[in-house]
Amino acid sequence: MALWTVVLTLLLSLASLSAEIKVYAVVMGKVQKVFVKEGDRVKKGELLVKIEDRLYEAKRKQFLGRLKAAKGSLYKVKRDYDRLKELFDRDLLSLTRLEDQKAKLDEVEGRIDEIKAKIEEVEVLKSYTEIRSPVKGRVKALLVEEGSYVNGVQVPHAVVIIEKSP
């Protein structure tokens, strides 16, 4: 192995020993619980801060209600489409009328897909209310305390600085 490769590897190892990692909140809410204090050693994946998730849970329930309503609409629109299709197949209905009903069906199905995506988005955001350590290290600074508010939606909000260990 070339000398410059050994030196570069050693420098990178030393740099990673003292690297600081800022941990951010990317959601908004009240800091419910801080599980660490300055100087604590933490493991990768360890829970550092918990932000209240009530807002996200309420939004999830709201979208679940919308999904249920949209599924009810889908049932009716699909039933009507099937009936009109049967009439069309017997030459008792115009193509335009059938196409109009198909457009309604597509619209409701699209709305259901949109609501499902919103539910998934809210569930992901809710998971971000548990802030975990991305690395093994030592807590260098706590930038929030219990009861304070973070608003990581507009700009990610730094909550902890961890000095990375090997």
Image (cartoon, rainbow, N blue to C red):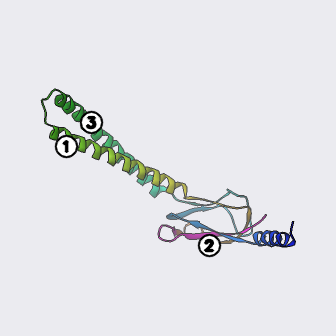
Kind of residue sitting beneath label 2: Leu
Q: Earlier in the sequence, mark 3 or mark 1?
A: 3
Query: Residue 140 — which label?
Result: none
Mark 2 or mark 3: which is in front? Answer: 3
Residue at 73%, 71% (x, y): give it.
19
Q: Quadrant of residue 45?
A: bottom right
Measured Cα–Cα span from mark 3 to mark 1: 12 Å
Residue at 54%, 54% (x, y): give it.
127
| Percent of width and height locating residue 79 | 25, 33
Query: Residue 143 — which label?
Result: 2
Measured Cα–Cα span from mark 2 to mark 3: 54 Å
Measured Cα–Cα span from mark 1 to mark 2: 57 Å
Total labels: the figure holds 3
Q: Quadrant of residue 160?
A: bottom right
> Which residue is tagged 1?
100
Kind of residue sitting beneath label 3: Lys
Relative height, residue 71 to residue 24 (above, below)? above
Q: Is residue 164 magenta?
A: yes
Q: Earlier in the sequence, mark 2 or mark 3?
A: 3
In this rendering, position of residue 139 left or right of residue 66:
right
Give the magenta part as a residue range.
150-166
Residue at 16%, 38% (x, y): give it.
95
Secondary structure type for disc 2: loop
Relative height, residue 165 to residue 74 (above, below)? below
> Which residue is tagged 3?
78
| Percent of width and height locating residue 46 | 68, 57
Kind of residue sitting beneath label 1: Asp
Q: Pointer 2: residues within 10 angstroms few (<14), some, or many (20+)?
A: some
In this rendering, position of residue 9 left or right of residue 59:
right
